[in-house]
Amino acid sequence: MSNARANILARLRANVAKTPIELDRRFESPDWSRDERIEQFCKAMRSVKTEVHQVNENDWQDKLADLVKEKKLKNLLYAPAGPLADKIESAWKKHDGLPELITREVDVDGWKEELFFDVDAAITSTRSAIAEVGAMILWPTPEEPRTFSLVPPIHIAVVEADKLHNTFSDAIATEKWHEGMPTNALLISGPSKSADIEQTLAYGVHGPVELVVLLIQ
Amino acid sequence: MHQTAEFHKRVKNALDNPQLRNNFRVAMDGLMEKRSNAFPDKKFLEELRITGSKLRANALVKQADLLEQLEANCTRNGIQVHWAETIDEANHIVLGIMDSHNATRMIKGKSMVSEEMELNHFLEAHGKSCIESDLGEYIIQLDHETPSHIIAPAIHKSKQEIAKLFKAKHPDIPYSEDIETLTRSARNILRSKFYEAEVGLSGVNFAVAETGTICLVENEGNGRMCTTAPPVHIAVTGIEKVLEKLEDVPPLLKLLTRSASGQHISTYFNMITSPRKPGEKDGPKEVHLVLLDNQRSKIYEDEELYDSLRCIRCGACMNHCPVYTKIGGHAYGSLIPGPIGSVIEPQKFGLDKFGILPTTSTLCGACGEVCPVKIPLPKLLHRLRYEQVRDDHTGATNGQGSRRSTKEAMIWKIWSWAHARPTVYRTGTRMASLFRGLLPKSMGPWTRVRSAPRIAPKSLHELAREEGFDNE
Amino acid sequence: MSLVKHYPDKPEKVYFFGTCLIDMLYPEAGLAGMQLLKREGIKVIFPQNQTCCGQPAWNSGYRDETPAVVLNQVQSFPKDYPIVVPSGSCAGMMRHHYPEVFKGKPESSQVNAFAERVFELTEFLVHVLKIELKDLGAPIKVALHTSCSARREMGVAEEHESLLKQLGNVQLVEQVRKAECCGFGGTFAVKHPDISAAMVADKAQAITETGAEQLVSGDCGCLMNITGHMEHKGIGPKGQHIASFLWERTHASDS
């Protein structure tokens, strides 16, 4: 083993003390009402080609049923032990002609091929969201693993308007992220995209081609 | 001098290529406009730049402590931290990790540090396959090229060129110049590569010491794929990317995406703090973080030049550089092109190798004006011009003094002598005026595209005297 | 430039630093600058010992060859009068880089005091003299090229424009990418002639496309580059230093 670590640190420390920087970490946050936050979130999300639907707490699952039919999905991946399960299952009991609901209780490694090539869409909850820039915050859980929001061509996400933060800084501070970060924390703003060819936006690169948000008022 | 000749040749080729010129002009105009639209409020922008520069400067001041804190927190979270002083060490660390898993297939997210390491070459020489998954990187890998821009690696290519390239490499796919179709083809080709890869490699945008978190900014989802789908994730980063606190991230993220592409936020911001925990159903089982020095700690030694380590790799300086726009990224001959490349690359690889780069600027100041972390790029380019011709052998920069020529030094000595002596200067200008008719019409490269400047019959010194303007 | 600059009250006397380029190639521009100042009722002093600001050596990395030249200027302008410079580039060198040239040297405080007295011509006309111009010329379409140092280092792009806008018969037209460098860059044009040529070609074309009948600039380096190219190619309008242009349009001696 080389002495890389010691050598690097020694070189950095060998230097004449650099002048300490005076920092003021109070980052400004806009003064928005709940409605303004919602409006800003929807506007920002739509500007990056997200399909946003404003729904109610009690019947969002009916909107979901309509959407999956409209999109002619073959199947929908969901988390049976996740926070959305009861509502989703009730909708599937209530409506006819809905795509197959699929769940896999094992590690993704056990059904990776199916996930990568045969799943049309997945639905997940979100932890919170950021109004200013239009982004959802996900802290994937064992119930709702991180590939759900990544691998299938369509990602449907349920966002609660009550959990909208003004800014990313607000989210980190109010939710006290520094006290413990999850394995993976994600900000998602729109379907995957690239402008690598002639600076022209093309959607649906390696992540979802479509992002649908059900925003619960 | 060989380097210089090669450089001028590359420049000439670029300038003589109208397609390339047009590709860059259109792309840079677009990127400048997007950035400008993303910062409608100039006061907000200025305040944010000050915040950003202070956050980065603070992290650099405390760099040694923060790296130790980062290592301790990563280790506690289960991320394995490796230190590499050189590119070679870093490459062997990556190879060692792959070998320990008997892995042969790597899928790569966009990483300029891996380009710096020339990791693909190294691993391929050791029998491994490395597939680039960022669309731009994938395109240039197909064509065996290097990136021409740090955030848009294939920006030098038109869609027609890319369509032909795809057809040549994947004859089974129907020819199309439609950007959406080309993008979808890449998605389909690469999907199975993500599925098969045993190791995923990524770069790092920010490494947060406070929590031991690796942050990645991206739009395509390939970065998430590389750090989620394969069983092993290796992140490579320069040691300067460390930040002190999690709360330092949002302002810098805001600056980064808006400066780079005018986006208020990228599609994905991916924060990784540990490998898969018991009970979790996906994610890599091992996460490695390779901390690469490669001269960064040497750059750190210089009180002025170390400002260049603040860079967050947004590319705004090249987007706004009139020279970069004319010649494109490849002409520089360095991995990182444009103003920041002309500052960093000579420091990393030596002024003897890249000494031409600090002169490849008009010092117009456009780069410094847009830098989100206020790196004084013109000042640093200027400083390196000094480093390459100084002859006192006291500076820290590699290759110091390597571009000093006896002839040029003599010219400036004479120039200095004449301009420090008013009588000599006045006699000189008077002679020039008197014999201005004898001045050649051809003055080398200047008059290839311009008429020769005409010396006035009387100098301002003379006119001022004649018009009665007092001497003191 | 975010620097807040403090302008003095209108003085009785000013120094004029003509710049070496104007001295040899565009003396009429220097004279026009002095006449504009004089017309505002102040005494203009032109120290005959002035030479060059020292920028050519400084920007080429020859830092050791610069101080002697700088010191000559500092000594040639000894009194505490403002020093007016008809060039953003030379003014930028004298105001912002002189302190760097002498950083940590015994002459430092003397040089810093000198630097603080340096003003670019247009900012001096606008902020110190609060000049009011009356246009006597015929209607004309004018394009303005503001040098990078005037724009970014001295922050006087608006002052250039506001002076031209005072002229009633002048229609100021705007070329595309007006803030982009013309490709002069001092020794850059010599060390990288091909890039410089490509840059000036684009700039000249942009100016020509405006249909302007006159090009105006506050810096003779840019002017020499752009008009030199336009003349060579037989395109575009004639060029003039902003001081000459302002003086000619507002000077009543012929009528």
Image: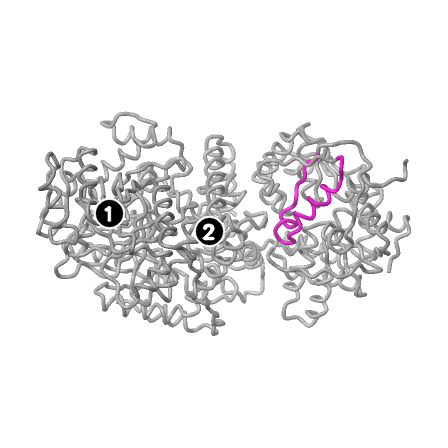
Q: Are marks 1 and 2 on the same chain?
A: no
In percent of width and height, residue C218 lies at: 71, 45
Name the residue at 30% across, 32% down. Answer: B182
Q: Tell me the magenta residue range.
A: C142-169
Amino acid type shown at disc 1: Asn
Q: Secondary structure at mark 1?
A: loop
Letter of the chain that mark 2 sits on in the rendering: B
Q: Which residue is pictured at 58% across the width and 34% down the height?
A: C202
Disc 1 from disc 2: Cα separation = 52 Å
- Residue behind mark 2: B341
Q: Give the side of residue B445 with respect to residue A60, left or right.
A: right
* C46, above or below B166, in the image: below
User: Nearer the observer, disc 1 or disc 2?
Assistant: 1
Asked if residue C143 lies in the magenta stretch, the reply is: yes
* Left or right: residue C46 compared with residue C205: right
Please state, as top left, top right, bottom left or bottom right, where the C terminus of chain C lies in the image: top right
Name the residue beneath numbered marker 1: A56
Q: Nearer the viewer, residue C198 or B30?
A: B30
Provide residue C1's location: percent of width, then percent of height. 60, 55
Crowding near the residue tagged with mark 1, few <14, some 14–19, many ≥20 C-alpha atoms within 10 Å: some
